[in-house]
């Protein structure tokens, strides 16, 4: 039976946004000088949107939050085997707000930023591997 085209479209939009965030995280890391705080923010955003896209596909409602642990618990309720992935990504939650405001005097270092991007890329790939072909971004 074919999947609902409206659900496919809505899910695809989340994953396309997640892909945009991954690309932005990569580009800002490569800048000279690198925009480290911007890169970690977009790494967190990519994971958040991938998790939310997964939930949209499974028609699991979620509230507006940047908390990857909260969103991740909902992912686990659908796919318990993804607990390891949630455990690996939950620390990225802090990047939704840390380093985002002018009064933040510290920046992440380049190693931390690269690690955040690698974790985000892995999370994105793992999540889409658990979805049908129709909703995987090109």
Image (cartoon, rainbow, N blue to C red):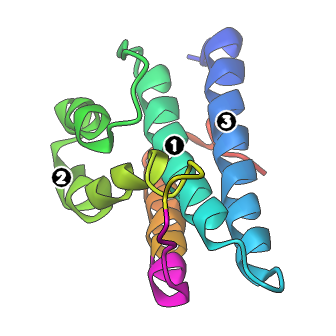
Q: In terms of secondary structure, where does tag 2 sit?
A: helix
In primary-sequence order, the first of circles 2 and 1 is 1
Q: In terms of secondary structure, where does tag 3 sit?
A: helix
The residues colored magenta run: 105-115
| Disc 2 to disc 1: CB gap under 8 Å | no
The residue nearer to you, when weighing 104 against 92, is: 104
**Residue 29 x/y as whole percent:** 70, 77
Eyeballing the image, is 26 above or below 103? below
Which residue is labeled 2 in the image? 83
Which residue is labeled 1 in the image? 50
**Residue 119 x/y as whole percent:** 43, 70
Find the distance from the CA under tag 3 to the CA under tag 1. 15 Å
| Residue at x-position 41% and y-position 35% | 66
Find the distance from the CA under tag 2 to the CA under tag 3. 24 Å
Q: Residues within 10 Å of mark 1 (few under 14, many from 20)?
A: many
Which residue is labeled 3 in the image? 134
Q: In terms of secondary structure, where does tag 1 sit?
A: helix
| Residue at x-position 48% and y-position 21% | 56
Eyeballing the image, is 133 above or below 13? below
Residue 100 lies in the magenta-colored region: no
In primary-sequence order, the first of circles 2 and 3 is 2
Q: Quick check: 11 left or right of 13?
A: left
């Amino acid at each position: 039976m074919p999947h609902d085209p409206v659900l496919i479209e809505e899910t695809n939009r989340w994953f396309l946004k997640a892909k945009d965030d991954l690309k932005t995280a990569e580009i800002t890391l490569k800048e000279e000088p690198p925009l480290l705080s911007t890169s970690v923010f977009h790494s967190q955003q990519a994971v958040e949107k991938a998790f939310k896209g997964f939930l949209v596909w499974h028609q699991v409602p979620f509230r507006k939050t940047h908390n990857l642990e909260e969103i991740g618990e909902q992912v686990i309720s659908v796919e318990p085997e993804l607990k390891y992935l949630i455990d690996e990504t939950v620390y990225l939650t802090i990047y939704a707000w840390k380093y985002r405001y002018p009064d933040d005097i510290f920046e992440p270092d380049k190693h931390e930023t690269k690690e955040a991007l690698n974790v985000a890329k892995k999370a994105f790939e793992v999540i889409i591997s658990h979805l049908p072909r129709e909703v995987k971004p090109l």
